[in-house]
Amino acid sequence: MSYNNNTENKPESSNERRKLFVETFGCQMNVSDSEVVVSVLRGTGFELAENPGGADVILVNTCSIRENAEKRAVNRIRQHLGEKKRRRGVIVGVIGCMAQRLKEQFSENGIQVDIIAGPDSYRDLPSLIAEAGTGQQAVNILLSREETYADISPVRMDKNGVSSFVSIMRGCNNFCSYCVVPHTRGRERSRDPGSVIREAGELVDAGYREVTLLGQNVNSYLWRNSSNGEKVDFAMLIERVALELPGMRIRFATSHPKDLSDKLLHTISRYSNICKHIHLPLQSGSSKILKLMNRGYSREKYLERVGAVREIIPECSLSTDIIAGFCSETEEDHLATLSLMEEAGFDFAFMFKYSERPGTGAAKNLDDNVPEEVKIRRLNEIIELQNRLSFESKKTDKGKIFEVLAEGASKKSPYDLTGRTSQNKVVVFPAENHKSGDYVNVEITGFTSATLTGKAKNKS
Ligand code: 5AD
Ligand code: SF4
């Protein structure tokens, strides 16, 4: 690729490309956004630095979902500001959700960053960097109703070259009462399906074998063509991707239970290249708590949707997110979560302690009144139960043969490959003559609660 050597912060005569270091905290959407940021800045003459020590511009893409995530990011930002003291002229910027949430409050808290850029202002980064180069703090925290970065081809930064992401929508309209995302990422908007197919096609051309379609709530994806009124929903979009990219595995995240339609489940079951795994965040098994969380479904409705998944896609795995100790959660509510987990038999879960986020509905209207030690104890009980459920889920896989997409050498041995089944379970197996990017039929011979182990049956 060519660089135009724009030299805003370098002497006129310098031919060196400016170096950019981007560090990413948080969810897959942030990883995907960082790839957009690198693409935007490459176009203005930046190249990637391996580490912050070699960078002219350091950007930290931040997450606000829980207080701990913010604390980790602040520690890193402070370290980078130390770099600035050692090397004059280095520009340190905060981008992403924390930038949006805290805005100028960074300076008020003694964190003197050069750039503050929210999730919808990444196209503006070249001029923000130029402004920061003049010694002024540069800020853009405007949220957009339209921005989807549809025309920007992200610069892939994954290590394996096998599996990557395409973001299909941005923002969220759900306003779950605990959640900061609608406040930091703005209103929901869906991306033109043509641009989604184009970007996924570019991944195929680059040798990728798996794509994850990303959105806060992919089930509410809806594209309206303003010229002919055509509507494309998520079931239609994923079907198009599956048909147009038959050699590609397709995953998606995240599904909101209230919008998980039978139509989508039938589409998933119809195409062998759509992975049989649904991430369906539960949050709580108590209808009372779900109502306070503004989730839009009850315990019964969630279980009804799990039943539909089991009926329409029997081989489908289910993972979930759970929050322990939300406002006014009683022991009975907590037990309802545990019993629902058993009933649904989740294969995997991300489990969190409730963390009040300023500005959210819960922070404004509800009391964060579950004592810390009770939150911790309940979270531990949830984790313990999930460990057992994960173990049981793996146990049923023993003796079965799964098609595994190999993603690279296992961490423990260069002679083993690691990959995932359609159900998103990690499998480690002897590489033999197989390599990263291959689909390999693996017979499962053993397991722990985290990983399946097996042996290749034949080369597919
Ligand atoms: N406290 C704890 N967990 C949270 N999540 C979102 N907001 C909070 C919060 N304030 C969890 C939810 C969500 C996942 C991405 O993070 O479970 O599904
Ligand atoms: Fe947050 Fe709820 Fe939107 Fe998910 S659906 S991003 S939990 S508000």
Image: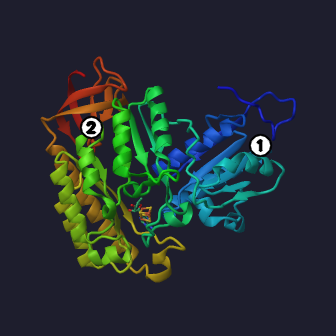
Q: State the image coordinates of residue 217 (x, y, percent, origin top left).
A: 40, 57
- Image quadrant assignment for residue 45: top right
Amino acid beneath label 2: Thr
- In the rendered image, the vertical position of residue 53 relative to residue 140, given as above or below: above
State whether residue 321 appears in this view. no
Report the coloring of the rendering: rainbow
Amino acid beneath label 1: Arg
Quadrant where the C terminus is found in the figure = top left
Residue assigned mark 2: 421
Give residue 87's mark. Answer: 1
Image depth: mark 2 or mark 1 in front: 2
Q: State the image coordinates of residue 440 (x, y, percent, origin top left).
A: 26, 26
- Image quadrant assignment for residue 44: top right
Quadrant where the N terminus is found in the figure = top right
Which residue is more in the foreground, 205 or 398?
A: 205
Which residue is more in the foreground, 2 or 200?
A: 200
- CA–CA distance in space, label 2 to label 1: 47 Å
Give residue 133's mark. Answer: none
Please name the residue shown 27% across and 45% down the image.
268
